[in-house]
Image (cartoon, rainbow, N blue to C red):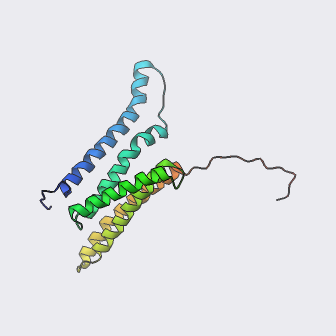
Amino acid sequence: MKKSKDLVNSSNIMLAAVLTMLLLAALITVGMLTPLIVRLTTGVEMGMSAEYFNNRSALPTAALVVLLTMGLLYGYFDAKRTLFVGGFTVAISIAFAFLSPFGNLPLDVAVPVVSMALVATFYKIYMSLQSDSRAMKLRGVSAHVIHLGIILILIGIVASSNLKVDGSAVVSMDSAG
């Protein structure tokens, strides 16, 4: 691990990512324990819907993905470029939130963040393939295939949560069709 006096270095990026992960864990734990505590103390049954978790965990999850993207790129980029990538990703997400190209706030914010993570992962796979040793190529690519899987899971979560189509239609039995 490189020692650096810069504010943006691998240790600080990892620390910020771990703290963000702890915040997410705390939010989820509170959401899961609240119905149990309410039932034990008052006897009232309650449940937490997906909206409770989605609304509270969206921003920390986006921050975590940006931090992990910066961590992926820090080994190849210097501190200024890494900070630029993180800042650019956040700026594009904010711009998408105001412009709303998809008409759905969580999707508008998530698309730039997940896209940048996807680009960073493919970049790391490409850089791993530049190694001379076959074992190093395999080792480097296999680690980032896992990252790619996690990103695809995030894409699935965002898409399934925010692209629901609910509706109904009345079809007449008299018409041919």
Q: State the image coordinates of residue 88 (x, y, percent, origin top left).
A: 34, 58
Looking at the image, is 127 positioned above or below residue 152? below
Looking at the image, which residue is at 27% across and 64% down?
Answer: 73
Q: Is residue 157 visible?
A: no
Residue 71 shown left or right of residue 151 in the figure: left
Q: Residue furthest bottom?
A: 132
Count of residue discs: 0
Q: Residue at x 36, y 57 (%)?
A: 89
- Residue reaching furthest right? 174
Q: Would you identify the image quadrant in which residue 131 lies?
A: bottom left
In the visual, does 77 lie left or right of 171?
left
Residue 22 appearing in the image: yes
User: As rendered, which of 88 and 11 lies closer to the eye?
Assistant: 88
For the point 57% across and 49% down, the residue is: 164
Quadrant housing the N terminus: bottom left
**Snapshot quadrant of residue 125:** bottom left
Residue 49: x %, y % from top left: 49, 37
> How far from the left and from the top, in percent, is residue 45?
49, 25
Instruction: Out of 177 and 94, give the one closest to the viewer.
Output: 94
Q: In the rendered view of the protein, which quadrant contains the C terminus?
A: bottom right
> In the image, what residue occupies the spot 41% across and 28% down?
36
Q: Is residue 66 left or right of residue 48?
A: left
Vertical comparison of 90 with 75: above or below: above
